[in-house]
């Protein structure tokens, strides 16, 4: 059995979550997110972001979170702007368009959206009423390329959105990894202040399922639960989500798990860097994209699974390695050993 | 703490499911339903319905299953017919309409749809192209009133749909309860033969989440997975659904759980009947609707939670009592004791 | 060639409209409704409703007007309430649902919606967030049964909507006929004051195409043009609509045409009444629904076209007769002659 | 009053159309496209494309035609491919996305789509079911840049689509101009053979409104009328469209009008070319894009209206000049005179 670096959702969940599910299993609870675990978990999250007026909702996965948020925020003729690498553009089978909204794509170097990238899009959408109206900026943190937003970058983007009467939405499927990155200067509180709406991803950070949508902008809070129900995302046994987030938020388990994933990736990155290997983008989270020659890729493929991400030249390709909350030291060491022996 | 007869999703899940989740927790598996547990569970289901050409998909909940199935089956101008009591008409926040399709409502006596109820709807929709085209019949088994379809009824309905070039879709959120009802003469195989598409509900029968959509009609199978993904219903950790259904299908746990729920309801029904209490509908599954006077309702409310369903007259109302896979003998006996002491 | 009483859109348009199209034909004008004729026509309409802050838009037809208005007013989880006889429920191929919104149907005696009909619907939609939220009341004036709203009725309905935080939308495909009915006590200004949004129908009252949507409620005005464009309803040669409404509004041609249609219908009604014929509903506009025995229907059918609307008993049916702006005295007299000779 | 070269829909319609509307004005006709003029016009079109099995429908405008065709052809998870300059991408306020479908954009040199442009898009959409499925190729002829498809190009594209199980749809808002271009080797019959569905635009070629959608592929014909009705595009007085196309198709008026527009543009092009002026793209239809210095642009702007299309360098910009069926020799000569005097 090969060890897989293909993604961060190959394993089940952190054992504490299963223990907690077992502990509370026979309690009778109200359905649809009104259970006491969900209520407690929501309160902890509100405390952690220092905003008691925020609204928190739990849903199952990232595509679901994205389509619910975006379709609830926009009017029919409004659209969302995303980096071309964005998950909503490439990996969600047109989920956003299926709710009626265009996604405008902008090219970026590193997966991060800058005001200077957005301005030309706004300039090209002034032919009222013949064009969609850009109203929401969608960003991921960490991005699909493993990069993260620095505090100043997010402040600039946030200010730009406000000035242009747009909302800012952060896809946080890997937000834990972004915040606990060794180079991060952004806290969860910062993010809550600088975005209108964002989510904390559980699925890719040790939960079975679950993303916590957090609505900071009160004008977007009204009737939000209707949207969740209408899109089929309101679990009857909401406890499943509540218990998981309660456990993840307790003792900062959520951040510890992300930190572990990051650290394992950084060990591999360091080993590769020392061998002079270059990377598609310089990342400090749980995704790395080393450029390897095809022989090395073949050798590594005998023991490990990973995606060959992008052809670079005749002899080499960038591969994507993703570590998870559960990636063991042993797997990392085995990988490094092969590197050491072959480069 | 009052015992709740409000619904069949108040508790967690059957302990065997949690044990199974724990047992397989650290295995690395492919995502998005390609894990080995999902594949095994699908095969068992295909064997049980005796149709190796069926397609099986797992999704999280009933509203999600309904909206995915209906929107994938219908062309934009086609619509679905449902009993007025149908879940898609009353309890899903317009989820079907949100995908662009009208739901035509027909009045029924007992929640069950008959060909003679549908014919007038077809007759009233002949003004082409000014009206929607009825193309799908949606039924629930057991129904929202706890009633079930007999074999002959389903055969007639199935034949009527075929003759009228319509599809038949069974919402099986409580299909286990229907099949294991003491008066049922319908098997799972019968249902697979007589419907074009149906689902086996897990959420209301001992799973944490999960409904198994089964597509019998091959013309409806093409590209179905795209619809699941687009609606945000494709779990990254599909194993969560696969492991649950694998466990439920093993040793017929699924049917045993449903049978237990039914039996507990039938005990209460029997006790009430012996006191001369009448019922809103004569049910043989895990939902009963006794008509009680308001004093009795008040007394029962001190120890139990349940919905007062419908006002019947000045002095009495029908209440809805739902038992679950986990409803204990003790809870049932306590309830009956109060009945005995007060009627 | 039989004379047709089937509808009020069998002929072309009033000759003054064609003359006007000819007169201005070679002028170069801005497209998309920015032509000078459209601007003038809008100003006249605003003067006639005594509301300079209203917004006016022209679109081609009724279904288009209905779907644009409703989809622009509602949020995804909100729905519209209509009389069961409403055009949006029966004659628009699910156009409203295709934009994502449920239409709740209420039974009415005469096609008119009363607060007491709506209240139970509101009462039955309190299970938040599991049900759609009623937010808009759709009425037609005149209704599909030819009946009209009296001032007091519209005041009550308007007040009820405001109290319940709902909008009121009047489909005015035959608003000219309603206002000029001999029993009407509602003026165009009243309607503008009492509704949030309504339209003045041209297609059924002497135009080639065209409905004038009038938005009185300023909170519904923002960005409305985007919705028109997005639904494919913004004509490049907006002048076609502008010139027609300019002509119709000049010298009150619009109201004269409607009055003529009404009068011709009333002549037939009077002739039938004098013969003791009864009617499905007592109407004072250009639609009448006399109940005739089948022999008479056969005799009339030799010379006239009309719809047999509804079977009443073994020997008789209600027929629908519609007169138009162009129905000649001769056609009416011929019809009455046959009545006189055969009843 | 300046003469406008801004577009080809500034004037009314060809006088023969108004005469024809007048001639038939008082006839009573069936509604919704069942009038005799529509039926005759459809038959003429079928003869002209030499395909009696084609289906023909008339709608009001281009955005409407595009959204109806695309939403009726695609399943929910399928998408359409368009040149980045395509009308559906830039000028229709997200009308296609509003029906639930993504539009994939491909860069082209001259507005024309080639198989080699599409192939990479197909290659990048193999991650089933996580991405939309490309199923329809949308092209315009003439394109938004005034260029046209040569027969060989359309044959290649048609074959490529068939091989890849995709449909080919031609937006023919300016199809008359394409076919009558002096360099065209494509006939209407060719187009009908090589596309699955296309439309003949009337609005930009002498009609008041109207595009004739022609469905060649019989698998796309079923129930098409429902889609037209549902999108609000079925005119009650369908005669308005039928009479116009009847007139346009008689004596090839349609093609004569387009030819005139082309010729007037070519006169201006020739005059500019003789002065050594270059063009953004080399066009042979009624749109030309000369690159002029800003002084000349200012001088021309005193007497003419046109769009400054694109900044080319510090001193010059490309402008867009569009001629119409009604552009007079006088206007063209005046324009050329200014060119002669100033360059």
Image (cartoon, coloured by chain):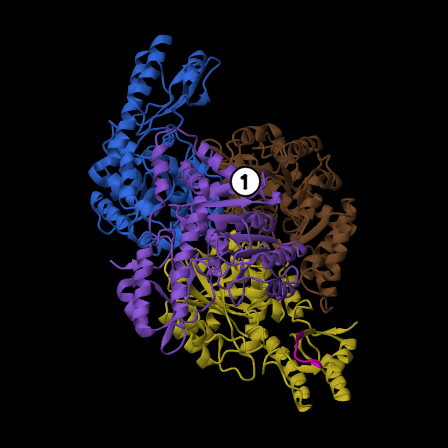
Chain colours: A purple, B blue, C brown, D yellow
Q: Is residue D286 left or right of residue B232?
A: right
Magenta-highlighted residues? D309-316
On screen, B224 above or below C340?
below
- Image quarter for residue B88? top left
Tell me the quarter of the image containing the C terminus of chain B.
top left
- Residue D242 seen in render: no
User: Residue at point 68% right, 86% down?
Assistant: D272
Q: Position of residue B307 (x, y in %)?
A: 43, 24
Q: Position of residue B176 (x, y in %)?
A: 28, 34
Residue on which disc 1 sits? A46
Residue nearest the observer in this picture, C191 or C173: C191
- Residue C94 seen in render: yes
Residue nearest the observer in this picture, B257 or C191: B257
On screen, A109 above or below B151?
below
Q: Is residue D161 left or right of residue C54?
A: left
Q: Position of residue C172 (x, y in %)?
A: 65, 44
- Image quarter for residue B334? top left
Residue C303 on the magenta segment: no
């Amino acid at each position: 059995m090969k060890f897989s670096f293909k993604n961060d959702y190959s394993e089940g969940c952190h054992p504490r979550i299963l223990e907690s599910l077992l502990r509370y299993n026979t309690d009778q609870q109200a359905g649809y997110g009104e259970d006491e675990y969900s209520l407690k978990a929501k309160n902890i999250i509100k405390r952690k972001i220092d905003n008691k007026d925020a609204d928190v909702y739990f849903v199952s996965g990232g595509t679901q979170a994205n389509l619910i948020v975006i379709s609830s925020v926009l009017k029919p003729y409004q659209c969302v702007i995303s980096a071309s690498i964005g998950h909503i553009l490439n990996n969600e089978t047109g989920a956003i368009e299926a709710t009626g909204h265009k996604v405008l794509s902008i090219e970026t170097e590193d997966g991060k959206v800058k005001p200077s990238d957005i301005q030309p899009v706004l300039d090209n959408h002034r032919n009222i009423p013949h064009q969609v109206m850009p109203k929401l900026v969608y960003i991921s943190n960490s991005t699909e390329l493993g990069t993260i937003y620095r505090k100043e970058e997010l402040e600039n983007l946030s200010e730009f959105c406000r000035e242009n009467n747009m909302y800012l939405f952060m896809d946080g499927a890997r937000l834990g990894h972004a915040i606990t990155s060794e180079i991060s200067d952004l806290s969860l509180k910062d993010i809550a202040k600088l975005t209108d709406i964002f989510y904390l991803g559980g699925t890719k950070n040790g939960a079975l399922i679950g993303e916590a949508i957090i609505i900071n902008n009160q004008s977007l809070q009204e009737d939000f639960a209707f949207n969740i129900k209408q899109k089929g995302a309101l679990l009857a046994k909401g406890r499943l989500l509540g218990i998981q987030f309660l456990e993840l938020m307790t003792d900062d388990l959520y951040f510890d798990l992300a930190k572990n994933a990051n650290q394992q990736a950084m060990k591999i990155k360091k080993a590769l860097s020392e061998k002079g290997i270059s990377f598609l983008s310089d990342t400090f989270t749980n995704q790395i994209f080393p450029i390897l020659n095809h022989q090395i890729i073949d050798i590594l493929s005998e023991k490990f699974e990973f995606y060959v991400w992008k052809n670079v030249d005749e002899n080499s390709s960038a591969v994507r390695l993703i570590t998870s909350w559960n990636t063991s030291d042993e797997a990392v060491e085995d990988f490094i050993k092969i590197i050491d022996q072959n480069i």
